[in-house]
Image (cartoon, helix red, strand yellow):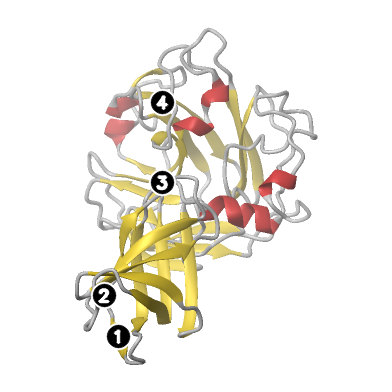
Amino acid sequence: MALSTIPFSGLGADASNQGVNFRNLIINGDMSIAQRGTSATGLGNGDLGYHTCDRWRFFESGSATGEFTMSQSTDVPTGQGFSKSIKMDCTTADASIASGESFGLQQRFEGQMLQHLKKGTSNAESLTASFWVKSNKTGTYSVSLYDSDNARIIGNTYTINSANTWEKKTITFSGDTTGAFNNDNNYSFNILFALVMASNFTSYDNTSWNSYADSRFGYGHTVNMLDNTANEWYITGVQLEVGTSASDFEFLPYDVNLQRCQRYFQKGYSDADNAVHAGRGQGTTAVDFHFSLVTPLRSSPTITQSGTGWRVFKPSSTLSDSSSTPTVARFYELNPYIVLRHSGHSGITDNYLFGISPNTLTYYFDSEL
């Protein structure tokens, strides 16, 4: 089902109206999409970034010695319609958190996705976050919203009351009448679920919008999820919507959810020479070619790959293999293709027509915020 076939009733409308589609700002809030894989180990020593469930970024600062394993789990709240969650499992303990150390789970947003929030005006919209959470560690955890365009922050806390029990939490944040979001495809805003916060991040009340300061980063957070390797924390059903109350979680069809994730990250596979692209010789060693995308990417991607490489088919019926990674020759925003350049070949003639094929390869296009 394409995105355009989903009935659309207008972003920013009454969040209690179940007919409003895409009211949830969060993408992949049910944790069902995990293109990169279902588990990543040893997170905590410069490993901030995207590892398992799409759109969910592992955040860290400082130099703590503790580590997490992040995984897509099948442990979910019973009878709520969820099949997956994110699990953060402490695998190396750090019972003494030094100044400047923090860990958490974050989702980032483009500014052009947020204009309906009317931020920076007298009509700025309130936002309500709702989510299901579970941990063996009871206590107080912090959640914050950060406006990176204007360096402003607001936060609040929730309490896990019962160990090893799924609980639903709801937090409402007031609208911010200061500082509009940039209307572009760059990083403007994030929501952060804290797992560890050093004391220098927790001392100053951040429950109203204010200029960012380290002391406002995780106000009220008291739990150290790294203090024991028995610690586990799960989350699913994350929703962030306009209004002062939480509606039921907005389940999207799997294919629609996947397509939304693929704006930021696409993964593809190829067996030996099963798709040949028309290319144009560039000098004597490179070929430029159009490569189809699943959906337009947010921005020109970082490309990585694993496997054999790429194969050029020459008019002389000979082949030239190269294991180098393609670079982006031209990127066109909103277009469902990209122009790649692949180098390291022999026998290329400038401006001549060649065929090029991924040869037993897995490739990754990363346009994350």
Under mark 2, the amino acid is Ser
x, y percent for residue 77 = 70, 54
Label 4 Cα neighbours within 10 Å, binned few <14 / some 14-19 / many ≥20: some
Q: CA distance from mark 4 to mark 1?
A: 44 Å
Q: Which mark is residue 324?
A: 2
Under mark 1, the amino acid is Asp
Q: Nearer the viewer, mark 4 or mark 1?
A: 1
Q: Earlier in the sequence, mark 4 or mark 2?
A: 4
Q: Can residue 326 be seen at all in this image of the molecule?
A: no
Q: Which mark is residue 182?
A: 4
Under mark 3, the amino acid is Gly
Q: CA distance from mark 2 to mark 1?
A: 9 Å
Left or right of 254: which side holds 56? left
Q: Which residue is mark 1?
A: 321
Q: Are marks 4 and 1 in contact (CB under 8 Å)?
A: no
Q: Which mark is residue 296?
A: none
Work out which quarter of the rendered image holds the N terminus and state it: bottom right
Q: Which residue is mark 3?
A: 104
Q: Earlier in the sequence, mark 4 or mark 1?
A: 4
